[in-house]
Amino acid sequence: MIKIPEGNIVLRDDRIKTKWTVKIKPFLLAKYPVTQELYFDITKETPSYFKGNKKPVETVSWKDAIIFCNLLSDELGLKLCYTINNSEEILFNNLANGYRLPTEAEWEYACKAGTTEIRYGEINNIAWYKENSEKTTHDIGLKEPNEWGLYDMLGNVWEWCSDIYDETTYGSYRIFRGGGWNDEERGCMSTNRRRSHPTSFKIDDLGFRVARNI
C-alpha cells in the first residue's frame, strides 16, 4: 500500500459541463490492481477471462469487489467497511479501518500524483491499451509507475470506484476509472469517467484496486 498525501482535486463531468473540488484526506492505496492470485487466495474464485496469477482480476462486478474487500479485511482482523443487509442494501462505514474501494476523487488524485496532466507519462511507457496490448491483459507492474509509485493506474483494466455516478438519472450505477487494454489512447486518461450496474455488469477489462483509511 502507498500512503497518499492530503490535497485537493478538481473533478469534472463533461456530460453536464460541471466541475467541483474535493478535499482529499491522507489514505492508503494499493500499489497494483488486485491480481487473480490474490483474488483466488481470498475468495477461492477465478472469474477472469484472461488467465494468469499476476494479471489483474477482471470480469468482476462492483459488488464482487466490495465482497472481496470485506473478506480481505476479515482475514486480517480489520473492521469491515461494508455491510450487506437482508434486503441486499449495502451500507458503508467510512470510519472503518478495513479495505474498501477508493472514491473517484481519491482515484483521480492518486493517478495524477501531483501533476495536472491527463496522463502521468507517455502512454506507451505507462499503459497497456489497444495499440500495444495484443488484445489481452498483462501482468501487473510491467509499465512505469507514476510519481507516487502506483502502477497500472491507466490501461490494462478499468478500476471500480466506490461512488454512485448520478443516482437521479442512473440509479445505483457505480463509477469506474482508468481505461483498459481494449481502449484507444483517448480512453486512457485520468479524467475519464464511466459507469455501470453494480451487480450485473462484468467485463474482461474491468477490475479494481483496494484502499484503506489511515
Image (cartoon, helix red, strand yellow):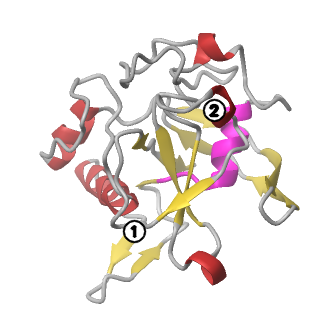
x%, y% of residue 141?
A: 45, 17
Residue 44 image label: none
> In front: 113, or 135?
135
Q: Look at 70% across and 37% down and name the residue there.
A: 190
Q: Is mark 1 on a helix, strand or loop?
A: strand
x%, y% of residue 164?
A: 58, 69
Give the magenta part as a residue range: 101-112
Q: Which amino acid does label 1 sit on?
A: Tyr
x%, y% of residue 167?
A: 61, 79
Magenta stretch, overall SS: helix
Residue 82 image label: 1
Q: In which quarter of the image is residue 122?
A: top right
Residue 188 image label: 2
114 to 192, vertically: above or below: above
Q: In which quarter of the image is residue 28?
A: top right
Q: Look at 56% across and 37% down and name the residue there.
A: 179
Q: Look at 68% across and 45% down and name the residue there.
A: 192
Residue 164 left/right relative to 4: left
57 to 27, vertically: above or below: above
Q: In which quarter of the image is residue 82?
A: bottom left
Q: Residues within 10 Å of mark 1 (few under 14, many from 20)?
A: some
Q: Is residue 79 visible?
A: no
